Image: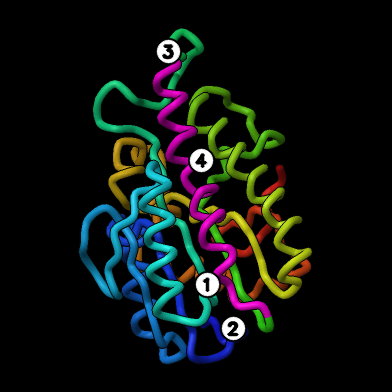
Amino acid sequence: MLNTYGSGLSVAVIGATGGIGGALCARLAELQCVERLYALSREPGGEGTYLYLDVTSEASVAAAAETIRTQVSFLNLVIVTTGILHDGGNFQPEKSWRALNQENFALAFRVNAAGPALVAKHFLPLLVRDRKAAFAALSARVGSISENDLGGWYAYRASKAALNMLIRGLSIELARRWPLALCVGLHPGTVDTALSAPFQGNVPADSLFPPEVAAAHLLNVLDGLTAAETGGLFAWDGARVPA
């Protein structure tokens, strides 16, 4: 796992106390190829060196990146796992256009699109230049415009579609400076976390992944990708998801 990145890796996981983020940190901490693991989130917890980071605060993103820059020469892998689908209150996936709400759109875009973009702004310059490296952000298949056959979930779908576009744009700029680096979106499938908990009723048991299984899937996908595939959105099984 992560064999294509070599050894002595420095890895940063943003959203490290979430379901998927925590599972990724636990798995990465077990890998002999990982020398330094940074766990970034709003609250400490789990494996790795903790640093405070809130994706809705650019100052905190910049401060975390600067701290890492003073401690290691480069990062080999950055994974952004933050995201919001609901808040347990007024912000819920819309079933109809009658539920469209400006504040909910602003929140979804601030967390799901602008947040990873700000992480990219400050963390892409930390990627190693002379070997394979990757910046990855968790996206979602429901952000695919061509695969939207059901409607609804307007703010979440739109914010993830925006993230997919940001990933594409960032990958183009990154390729000019770091030709060996990847910038990709990852669709983890439906994972048994607080984010998906209210919506698991119709998910087949074999399609609901424990976080530790999802983490292994995502690391395997990142291991198999090459620089030629930068800019894409890839599902947990490695298949490319259409825009």
Q: Tell me the CA gap for discs 3 and 1.
A: 38 Å
Nearest to the eye among marks 2 and 3: give it. Answer: 2
Q: Are marks 2 and 1 in contact (CB under 8 Å)?
A: yes
Kindly identify which residue carries mark 2: 5
What residue type is disc 1 on? Leu
Q: CA distance from mark 2 to mark 1?
A: 9 Å
Instruction: Look at the numbered disc 3 and give the secondary structure of its residue.
Output: helix
Q: Residues within 10 Å of mark 2 (few under 14, many from 20)?
A: some
36 or 216: nearer the viewer: 36
Horizontally, residue 194 falls left or right of residue 213, namely left
Q: Position of residue 129 (x, y in %)?
A: 66, 78
Residue 120 sits in which quadrant? Answer: bottom right
How busy is the neighbourhood of tag 3: few (under 14 within 10 Å), some, or many (20 plus)? Answer: some
Is residue 108 covered in magenta?
yes
Give the position of the C terminus as an image quadrant.
top right
Q: Position of residue 211 (x, y in %)?
A: 35, 61
Q: Amino acid at mark 2?
A: Tyr
Along the polypeptide, which appears first: circle 3 or circle 1?
Answer: 1
The amino acid type of the residue labelled 4 equals Ala
Residue beneath label 4, please?
A: 114
Residue underneath mark 3: 99
Distance from label 1 to label 4 (Cα)?
Answer: 20 Å
At mark 4, the secondary structure is helix
Question: Alpha-carbon distance for marks 4 and 2?
Answer: 28 Å
Mark 3 residue type: Ala
Front residue of this view, candidates 196 and 157: 157
Queried whether the magenta region covers residue 115, the answer comes back as yes
Callout 1: SS: strand
Q: Earlier in the sequence, mark 2 or mark 1?
A: 2
Residues in magenta, as a range: 102-129
- Crowd around label 4: few <14 · some 14–19 · many ≥20 (10 Å): many
> On screen, 154 above or below 130?
above
